[in-house]
Image (cartoon, coloured by chain):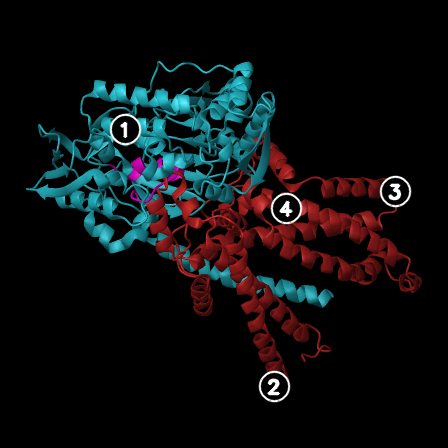
Chain colours: A cyan, B red
Amino acid sequence: MKKRLFAMLLALTMCAGALIGCSGGGENETTGETTAGTTDGSGKKVIMARSIDSNTLDPAMASKNQDIWMMNFVLEGLVRSAEDGKEIEAAVADTWTISDDYLTYTFHLRDGVKFSTGEEVTPEDCVYSIDRARNMEGSPWSGMLAVIQDVRAEGEDSVIITVSQPTASLLSLLAMFPCSIMPQSYCEEVGDEGVANAPVGTGPFILETWEKNSKMVFKKNPNYWQEGLPTIDEFDMMVVSDENTRMMQLKSGQIDMAEAPLSQLEELQNTDGIVVDEFASTSVDYIILNCQNEKLSDARVRQALELATDKEAIIKAVSYGYGTPADSFISPAAPHYNTELPEVTRDVEKAKELLSEAGYGDGLELTVQIGSGSTGNLQQATLLKQQWAEIGVTLNIEQIDSATASANWSALNYEVYFSYLTSDMTDTSELAELWCVYDSTQCWGSGWNSDRQKEAEEYVKMAATEMDEDKRMEYYCAMQEIVAEEVPNIPLYNSSFYIAHSDKIDNIVQTPLGNYRFETLTKE
Amino acid sequence: MREFNYILKRILQMIPVLLIVTVIIFAGMRLIPGDPAVTMLGDHATPQALEEMRHKLGLDQSLIVQYLIFLKQVLTFDFGNSITLNAPVWQLFRQKAVVTLTLTLMTGLATLIISFLFGYIGGISRSKAVTKIIDTAALIFISVPEFWIGIQLMMILGLKLGLLPVGGWGSTWPEHLRSMILPAISGCLGTSALMIRNIEEEILKIRRQDYVDFAYSKGLKKSIVRDRYILKNVMVSTITLFSMRIVHMFAGSVVIETVFALPGLGSMLMQGILARDYTLVQGLVYIFAVIVLVMNLLTDISYSFINPRIRLE
């Protein structure tokens, strides 16, 4: 037996040797050209840790927050969203004109604006980048970009974009990451996979290396058009999925900034040398109800469920008191939020009445599917079970893995589902379409499809082509009222983004859309 | 010649085993519900985008075709690209295997040192107090989960005293090794505790054997009897236990990797399963299967070199 062990060890060591040998070679290949940059980097380096790595950095394919929020490190569009997440500001283009019929947009490229590679941005690059996003197979954004009829270059420094009908959200759409400007030659050289792993653009940083599930290293872009920015020379984004570890790393000074878990905010705020920044967010958490389910098809049942829900209690337990009760699926931090919506306060009696009117006076049994491993969702489900029990609704909690849960949800094979959404653009049209236009997303997985829904859809379509902001506001408010009455979703709470950092770091920006804007970040 | 025939036979035997492995992995991944296109595109997926993505990933082909593609990948040892990580599976494996192997080797080393040291002291000592203390400590470490030990170590040695990094893997080899100290300690304590108890019991048993008494009566020194007669015999069973735990460490390092933010194989495989990254999981599990089979073969072959009495047949 002893011999067997010795032999095993021998074999293991041989394997180890072989593997370490292999990987040594591999590492040199990928980082060889960039080691020079790291050694002379006497400059300022900031390290941040977050809980999860990005999947892709291809702007046309990015779909999760962990992808989208990283976009502004390297990429920018013709225009970009301002820090408040509501306005549009100049980026690659410095000025633009809109024709009187609102069908033709002419963008003038900033003089001498360069990609991080040093090449000047040409109108052809812009045409290529936007067309690439419009035609990308499997892109979640190509549907939204379908309003763009044509993109063409004119002269040395102009790009002309035409739309088939007046489109109020066009600038917002162009400020969104799918329309980021990338060099055509580079994209064609490295292909889609190359872009997904290392996009190149006009943004403040250059992505130098990306070790999957471990870290991204960004270097200052010396060709950035904003003089003097970024103020730091290197930014490392680490992946540390365990939140305790992340916070200990922050406290020990191993990292400078971290995505802060709500459970530890209070302790962090009371820790010397640590500052917690709060950023307004467009994120809304809600319960989605399957309107095509027999039991939930009656709007009165859905209203009853909202009336039976104690949003304050959920905020207290699930998000540790950080958050405010929501009354619309559109966040107060987003434009076109309807401030006049009637507040829904908990009313068990009225809820019971509505239920018996709908024919469920004797009670009702519903099932919520939640991803196992999410303690927040489990807590929320448990609270709801108690709260809804008071009106005679039995809520069964089914824990399955989250990939299965989301597959069931998108196939309308569920009753109750928890989700949240952050807006990706400075306009309301994205969320409004998700929630009210049946064909494009089946009203975002609720299957809501009724006369009232058609009414809301009509408002959303009118707002999309209306160029008068006041009128758009009116349409969107009317739409929100309908959704609030029909309750395809129960909005639960609005929350903020939190970044904890050492007190040596200052001027962090995260827009309400979630994008990290770290070009102005300073380190003492 | 006989050796050669034996090795050839063993390699030929591996082929059907690996074929069955491919079927199991393939069916296993397809049987759990969930759709890689949905997990990839997330919440914004429109039905049209989902369809296009399925087409792009080849998921709209029949299962047989998909399996044949996988089989071709296996035969050419090119596992294609991970769906979610946009990189070749083989390259990802090599990158992460360094971390996991370093962790396994250091944990194994720490286990050997700790368990033999304390097991030997506990078994040989005639003081009841010493044995009791070691036994109690071992019992505690058997019952305490390793992630908890990890967090405590990080709090004390990393945060309070600032001696060692709090998680992470660093970027140079000295940093890598330094960052492995705490994970190795937290990972080794549970196994060490098991082994300490095993070593103690063995020593107590062997001490009562006739040949030990005989060695003493021959007039051999205490230290010689202990080294040559007791310790050598203790090795046999202890090392069987250890070899089983080493495989366990290599495969089951997810918890330690997560707590210490180590970018290793365990966490990557876990993530792949959760995201339904078919190609990544298929590739990784297949590579694991090959490693286990090859390790076994190498072990058996090296038997004959270590112990000439054993013949390969």
Per the model, the C-alpha gap separating discs 4 and 1 is 61 Å
* Mark 3 element type: helix
Amino acid at pointer 1: Glu
Up/down of B273 relative to A205, above or below: below
Per the model, the C-alpha gap separating discs 4 and 3 is 29 Å
Q: Residue at x 11, y 38 (%)?
A: A160
Q: Chain of mark 4?
A: B
Q: Which residue is mark 3?
A: B128
Q: Residue at x 55, y 16 (%)?
A: A348
Q: Are marks 4 and 1 on the same chain?
A: no
Q: Residue at x 40, y 27 (%)?
A: A283
Q: Which residue is mark 4?
A: B187
Per the model, the C-alpha gap separating discs 2 and 3 is 57 Å
Residue A458's label in the rendered image is 1
Question: Does the segment drawn in magenta span residue A71?
Answer: yes
Amino acid at pointer 2: Met
- Using the rendered image of the protein, determine whether residue A365 is visible from the camera's viewpoint: yes
Do tag 4 and tag 3 residues touch (Cβ < 8 Å)? no
* Mark 1 element type: helix
State which region is magenta. Answer: A59-76
Residue A52 point in image, percent of width and height: 45, 39
Question: Does the segment drawn in magenta span residue A267?
Answer: no
* Mark 2 element type: loop
Labels 2 and 3: the sequence-earlier one: 2
Residue A365's label in the rendered image is none
